[in-house]
Each structure stands twice: as structure tokens, then as C-alpha cells.
Amino acid sequence: MISTATTRDNRLGFRLDEATKALIEHAAQLERRKISDFCLTAIAEAARRTIAEHETLSLSERDRAAFFEALINPPAPGERLARALVEHSRRVGA
């Protein structure tokens, strides 16, 4: 039978000052959680937020309108793009 339980074999160690440790202990106590569980959850949530912020594109209203206008009514290919397409066709074939 294959176990689907998550194992915690990896470690992440770091040092912190007394004030930060007290802050974390107090927050964990308020949530009635172990310090390690509190820290693991907080770090994972912060990592997810950071990744989402870096992988999400936010456009202003003007930029959004310009983007969709270019999708709906794309501009005609310029001279450089036309030359690149001819060169690509020559090298790769149709």
C-alpha cells in the first residue's frame, strides 16, 4: 500500500534574536499552536504570496486596454518581422 502522508525529512535552520523569538512564541501561543507548526505555516504562506506576486502580471487600465486592442486588432507586420519570416521559411521550410 502506498502512503500519501507527507513526511518531514528536510530541515531548515536559522538563528534569530530574542525579541523576534518572543514575538513568534507569543503569536503561536495566541493561536494555540506549536512554534514549529506556526513557523512552518507562516513561512509557506509567505513563500506562496511572494511567488504569486512575482508570477502575476498586473496592468493598469490603460495597459489592459492596449493589450486587448492589440489582440483584437493586431498591427500589420513590420519590415523586420517580414524579413525574419522569409529567413525562417528559407531555413526551416514551410
Image (cartoon, rainbow, N blue to C red):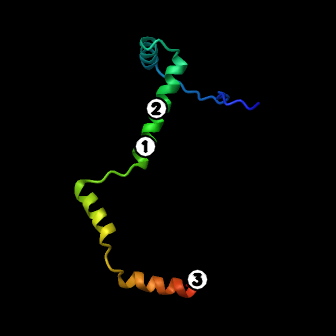
Q: How far apart are marks 1 and 2 (CA)?
A: 11 Å
> Would you name the residue on which mark 3 appears?
92
Q: Which amino acid does label 3 sit on?
A: Val
**Which of the numbered marks, if any, corresponds to residue 45?**
2
* Closer to the camera in the image, 63 or 24: 63
Do the residues bearing badges 1 and 2 touch, measured as CB atoms within 8 Å? no
In-image side of 76 versus 90 (left or right): left
Q: Is residue 44 above or below residue 23?
A: below
Residue at 64% in and 29% down: 6
Q: Position of residue 4 (x, y in %)?
A: 67, 31
Which of the two discs, 3 and 1, labels the residue nearer the N terminus?
1
Packing grade of label 2 (10 A; few <14, some 14-19, many >=20) is few
Q: Which amino acid does label 2 sit on?
A: Glu
Asked which secondary structure carries label 1, the reply is helix
Quarter residue 2 falls in = top right
Packing grade of label 1 (10 A; few <14, some 14-19, many >=20) is few
Which of the two discs, 2 and 3, labels the residue nearer the N terminus?
2
Q: How far apart are marks 2 and 3 (CA)?
A: 47 Å
In-image side of 4 versus 57 (left or right): right
Q: Which residue lies furthest to the front in this view?
A: 1
> Would you name the residue on which mark 1 appears?
52
Q: Position of residue 41 (x, y in %)?
A: 50, 26
Quarter residue 83 falls in = bottom left
Which of the two discs, 1 and 2, labels the residue nearer the N terminus?
2
Do the residues bearing badges 3 and 1 touch, measured as CB atoms within 8 Å? no
Q: Which residue lies furthest to the right in this view?
A: 1
Q: Where is residue 70 in the image (x, y as percent from the top left)?
A: 31, 68
Query: Quadrant where the C terminus lies?
Result: bottom right
Asked which secondary structure carries label 2, the reply is helix
In-image side of 18 versus 58 (left or right): right
Asked which secondary structure carries label 3, the reply is helix
